[in-house]
Image (spheres, rainbow, N blue to C red):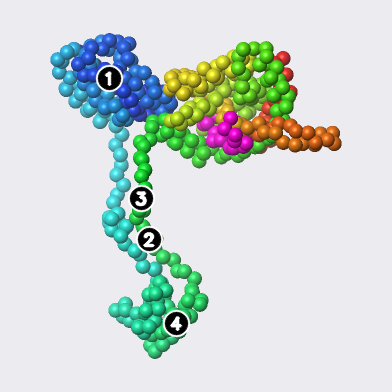
Amino acid sequence: MANVVHMPALSDTMEEGTLVAWHKKVGDAVESGELLAEIETDKAVMEFQSFYDGVLLYIGVEEGNAVPVDAVIAVIGEEGEDYKALLKDADIAAKKEAPKKEEAPKKETEKPSDEVLETVSAPLQKEENNNSSSNGRVKASPLAKAMAKEEGIDIHKVKGTGDDGRVVKRDIEEYLKNPPVEETVAPKTVKVPEPEGDYEDVPVSQMRKVISRRLGESKFSAPHFYLTMEICMDKLMATRKQVKELTETKISFNDFVVKATAKALKEHKNINAAWLGDKIRYYNYVNMGVAVAIDEGLVVPVVRNADTKALSQIATEIRDLAGKAKDRKLTPEQMSGNTFTISNLGMFGIDEFTAIINSPDACILAVGAISPKLVMVDGEVKESNFMKVTLSCDHRVVDGASGAKFLQTLKAILEEPMRLII
């Protein structure tokens, strides 16, 4: 018996998927567990394996097209088997489950869009000017009309002082010297001209769609506020140099920041939290999301239980996750479950920035570059290295004083890095 293959939900936030590539064509034999297709989710391109044995009888989605989760994408069965009735039943079932959309009532006064675009609305006048006759024509001298046209003046707005309210030359001159306050006018809709140069329209990827939706929801639903602190990195730079001599594992400044942040979060449970609508969740563990930029957008792989791991473990894991992110090989499990997120643009020379909270987390830490500057120490000028960090906080969960105390703890740890080792 033939089996219908539906678009799978390959992540907890996936609503639709794009069929990137078919690894089988109609008529090919397929075994259970064999690679059938590659599907782009909201987080990564995933390999999709067949659940059935048989022959690929039907492909319902062409490569490059997106369909909702549970939509029919293929049929697998015995060679020559009639599957059309099965497709019809699947289509009927999908229509029954689909929610009905309510149509908004049409307004009788609504004009067609092309008519609206071409209509230039006249000023909304509360009362008819005294220089207009009953048929709407303006009483004005030929010279006044010519002057008004040349200056771009609506002659209906000019008060006439000639016989019977006739607009004359001096009225136009007076109008130019003391133009009246603009009256309220109906909006004028103007067509946007097509660009004259070359351009390219690129379809929005599933990842970019979700980034847009989730960050938009976070920015406009969570009341953000920001706290910035400057941290002296002299001792940490010296410590990193010593650590490099003791281990073959390459440990970056970001690895130190991740470890220090995880340690600080254990002391500030109210920062390691999430807004869940009707409740606030405080985590007893630290799953650190580390933002990684790839060509298609931004992904956030998660270092689980970062507070319990050594620097070398964190460094190895982050490097492995970043590599998988760039190869689009991260699994949904590797990109979920974060309790806090770090976004570091220091390697790009960015001194300071603010990041949008990765909901439902309560906070995200934006990390800038390490830069030298002159400071006064014991009456002497010396050069020191500083790094700025900015904590974005959801004010529904975190107050200013709580965020400030967390940053004080983080600063103390990074400025005395031996606390990360002992």
Which amino acid lies under the numbered mark 2 shown in the image of this protein? Lys
Q: Secondary structure at mark 1?
A: strand
Of marks 2 and 3, which one's residue comes earlier in the chain?
A: 2
Which residue matches tag 1? 5
Alpha carbons under labels 1 and 3: distance apart? 45 Å
Which amino acid lies under the numbered mark 1 shown in the image of this protein? Val
Q: Secondary structure at mark 3?
A: loop
Q: Is residue 354 magenta?
A: yes
Q: Is residue 335 left or right of residue 63?
A: right
Q: What's drawn in magenta, residue-wise?
A: 347-365
Q: Nearer the viewer, mark 4 or mark 2?
A: 4
Which residue matches tag 3? 196
Instruction: Spot the residue most to the right.
Output: 379
Q: Is residue 323 above or below residue 170?
A: above
Alpha carbons under labels 1 and 2: distance apart? 51 Å
| Residue 244 visible to the viewer | yes
Q: Foreground: 80 or 64?
A: 64
Q: Secondary structure at mark 4?
A: helix
Which amino acid lies under the numbered mark 3 shown in the image of this protein? Glu
- The answer to which image quadrant residue 398 occupies is top right
Q: Is residue 350 left or right of residue 422?
A: left
Q: Nearer the viewer, mark 1 or mark 4?
A: 4
- For residue 275, the mark is none
Alpha carbons under labels 2 and 3: distance apart? 24 Å
How many other residues sit within 10 Å of disc 1, few (<14), some (14-19) or many (≥20)? some
Q: Residue at x 66, y 16 (%)?
A: 244
